[in-house]
Image: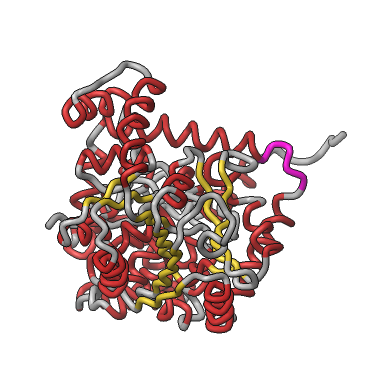
Amino acid sequence: MDTFEQRAEKAAADTRLRGVLRRAAGVLRGLRERAFADFEDFEAARTRLREARLRSVLRLPEMLARLEERVTAAGGVVHYAGDAAEAREIVVGLARERGVRLVVKGKSMIGEEIGLNGAFAGAGIESVETDLGEYIIQLAGEGPSHIISPALHKSREDVAALFQEKLGRTADTAPELTRIAREALREKFLAADMGVTGANLAVADTGSVVLLENEGNIRFSTTCPGVHVAVMSIEKVVETLDDAVDVLALLPRSATGQRLPVYLSVFTGPRREGEADGAVEFHLVLLDNGRSRILADPVMREMLLCVRCGACLNVCPVYKTIGGHAYGWVYPGPMGSVLTPLLMPSRETFALAHACTGCGACREACPAGIDHPGMLLELRRRGVEDMGWCGPGQRLLAGAAEAALAHPLLYRGLLGGLRAVDPGLTALSRLPVLRAFARKRRVPRLRPPFRSRIGATSRERPGRGGGR
């Protein structure tokens, strides 16, 4: 299996991919800027969103208990899944018990996280993605490259060729390609026995699940089939509808550049007596899969405030160069570089923490004000300490550097010696402990110290006599 470094290097060398990413990210960033152009006070709204999310996260057990009580009172059923395997077992088990043969799915990153499509296929159940982007990558046999725009890496020409290969139909324009997908999916909605969605939010006080979309596919998936199953990670609960409004004030603007998406749906239990449509069964699956471990970490629990808007991806220079697939799992970009090592700690996932330039653009764009760069630095530190990445040579060099930085005379003497014998650091960068670092970076020359340069400037400056 390729490492992150290998995948990133391959993606960075793909000029076609970089062109597609640059154009798409530019469009999304432009939409976001226009959406906030007339927004009165972004910082105040960000504070409200952050406080609403933080209140729920810090009282998560209480919020989940209240959510379960309200969902049950509304006629739904709540299931708890400790990990991905248990979540798959619950959802596939519900389908098997009801003799389901066809499932329609709304876009769900949690569904991707737990590998739900593979589980359905293993059980002999057909599952069809109904979001246009997800439908495209399902036909292509790929995973999403962006949490909001799963097929961001595909050009219109790519989609036309894919539809020709898989559906026997093609077109030249985006509206025509969309019509082909719509016609193929409409039959699936009408024939499906179960609809599976994610959830943008769940409201503890009312037992409601909130879903945002632009295509109407989620409403089809939740009202046409007789069974609706929503799969949600535990941290997405908020306490009240007012808290949900505070999140919704920024989430659509940050995600797609809209004040509100075309469809905002709030589901509270199954269809009631006298109602004309809606599922007759509603199930809410609450997934932990490492979130409790993050909640117990006072440094990293801030990541649980993420509302999955994708704004950090659209401004990240690393993501715009390598795309989402290079990250190796469901969550790419700055949020993925933090979340993936926390959910799946390993030597390979901790390498993602180094996919950061430290520019801070993600922190500025995040509607929850999450400090991605700070947490990535902490993950780097933990990677060195906990994953055993620091060998004897690295420890010796780090110790020498720390000693030099702690003593001004030693620091100036060391740099003075380096300037005299190796101002371009060419010899130093060939050392085994620095070779990999220097191979892909331009090492700057060591300039004379500022003190000597400012002193020379002062001596060369003409006298002040005869001033104005």
Q: Is residue 39 magenta?
A: yes
Q: How is the model colour-coded?
A: secondary structure
Report the label total.
Answer: 0
Q: Quadrant of residue 77?
A: bottom left
> Which residue is at the front of the view, 194 or 111?
194
Q: Which residues are magenta?
A: 36-40
Q: Residue at x 51, y 48 (%)?
A: 311
> Which residue is at the front of the view, 366 or 410?
366
- The quadrant of the picture occupied by the C terminus is top right
* Dominant secondary-structure state across the stretch colored magenta: loop
- The quadrant of the picture occupied by the N terminus is bottom left
Q: Residue at x 65, y 61 (%)?
A: 49
Q: Residue at x 51, y 57 (%)?
A: 200
Percent coordinates x, y for residue 13 in the rendering: 23, 37
Q: Is residue 451 magenta?
A: no
* 266 to the left or right of 125: right
Q: Quadrant of residue 97?
A: bottom left
Q: Quadrant of residue 205?
A: bottom right
Farthest residue, direction left: 1
